[in-house]
Structure formats: C-alpha cells, structure tokens
Amino acid sequence: MLRLVAALAVATAVTLSAAARAEDQADLAKAAQNPVAAMISLPLQNNTLFGVGPDGDTANVLNIQPVVPITIGRWNIINRTIAPVIYLPDVTNGLAELPQGVDGGSTFGLGDINHSIYFSPAKAGPVIWGIGPSFTFPTATNRKLGSEKWSAGPAAVALAQPGPWVIGTLVRQLWSYAGDNDREDVSQLLVQPFVNYNMEGGWYLVSSPIITANWEASNDDAWTVPVGGGMGRIFKLGDQAMNAQVQGFYNVERPEVGPDWSIRVQLQFLFPKGS
C-alpha cells in the first residue's frame, strides 16, 4: 500500500512538473513574440531575397536586433536596435538610367542602423501597446547600402494574446531631416502585422510580413507587399532559452528591381527574468 501511495505521489509530481514546464514554455513563447515584452533578447534575422534586379539575382540582409528593456515606475522602456549587414548584387544591368547615388557592381557591408524606443505600460491589459520615437542613422559603409540621411519619426505597436494566439501590428514612419543634399529625401512607412498560433512542445505557426512604402518613389515602385508565413519553436540549449523560426514570402507588389520572393530564418537568444 505504501509503495502504491509513493508511486502515485511520484507520478503526480512528474505530471505537475511537466505541466509547469509546459506553462513556462507557453509564457516564454508569448514573450518572445511580443515586440514590447520586458525581456532582453538578441534576434539574428537572416533574409535571403530572390529575383532581385533585371537578372533575377540574390541579395541577403542579416539583421542583428538586440532588445534591451528598462522598467521605470509604471513604464517599460523598450530599446530595439536593427543593424543590417547587407550583400547587394549589381542591379543596374539593363537600366537606361541609374538611380541617384547608385553605381554598378555588387556590394557588401553595414547598412543604416535603426533604433526605436517604445514606452509601454509595465502592467499589461487585454491590449498590450507601446509608442515612441524611431531614428535611423547614416552608418552604411557604402552609399548603395543606405540613404546617407538622418531620419526620425513615430513608431507604435499593439497586440493581444487570446489563448494560444498572439496577434498584433507594428507601424513606423520615418522622414529625413538632415544628410547628403544630393540624395533623395526619406519618407518611408513600415507596417508589420504578425500572427502566431502556439502549439504543444514549443512549436508555433507564424506570419509576420514586413510591408513598406517609399513615398518618395513613383507609384509603380512605392510598395513592397509580401504574403506568406512559416513555423518556429521555443527550446533550450542547456540553460539558454532560444527561439528559432523560418518563414517564406512572395511579393505580390514590389519595385522594379525588388525581389520576387524571400526566405527569413531567425535565431533568437532569450534572457527571461530570473534565468
């Protein structure tokens, strides 16, 4: 009888432990999918772009995106930086006139760094939100890889997390205010809707296309509109929490020299509080 009681106690403890781990994993997944979560993280997001330019070449953008939150009183201040490392093929072949500031040949280097600061309530309600300024700095190592302009504007994000879902949108608008007078002004909108559906074992389905509009371009070249999605998983390597995902997108609208489609692979290092 004592053995039976002991066995039942062990089984119950194992079940409760597994349930607690699953709950922790679900909470971690939702935090990883929340752009204004109060959690330090380091996403490494690689975007391979196919069908670029008149010859259908391949470009690549590796975005290094550290996220550092600070809590002050009732507010979380979320610092999100994007440092792009870019390989751009020669997209000038067959063009009668080169765009301003663009010469021939392929290029590799650092692009313009963007830094956004979101002010978000520390006590989240049914709708989680953040708003603040965004800045882009002319850090590109080659003029083909950046605007050579200083830009700034507002950024905002809003999301909800009903059940296994994480649904929201991030929006940013930038205008240039200084820089090389020989380069075109910057007026660019970015909209990133995101939908995640979390499943057992840390797996999830995701769609987070990045839609952009260049208001300084002609109507035919203004918009890039991708559609697609993929899947990912929250897991641990030793004690290190990780988030890995892969998505594919087809551009239903794109500039003349823009890519036809792309693959995004992301590996995110997570540093939850208390880890």
Image (spheres, rainbow, N blue to C red):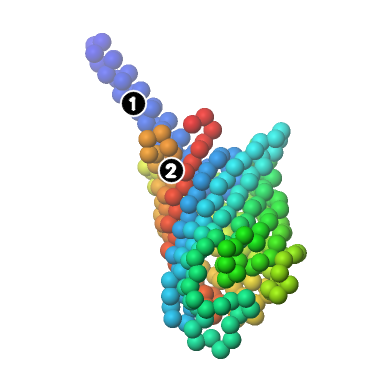
Viewer-proximal residue among 171 and 216: 216
**Residue 126 seen in this snapshot:** no
Q: Secondary structure at mark 2?
A: strand
In this rendering, the count of numbered labels is 2
**Residue 178 seen in this snapshot:** yes
Q: Is residue 268 left or right of residue 145?
A: left
Q: Crowding at label 2, few (<14), some or many (≥20) Cα neighbours within 10 Å?
A: many
Three-letter code, disc 1: Val
Q: Is residue 260 above or below residue 268?
A: below
Q: Which mark is residue 242?
A: 2
What residue appears at the point 39 percent right and 39 percent down from the top-left corner? 236
Q: Is residue 235 left or right of residue 125?
A: left
What residue appears at the point 40 percent right and 47 percent down from the top-left corner? 233
Quarter of the picture holding the N terminus: top left
| Place of residue 115 in the rendered image (x, y in percent of width and height, measured from the top left) | 64, 53
Viewer-proximal residue among 25 and 163: 25
Q: Is residue 125 above or below residue 106?
A: above
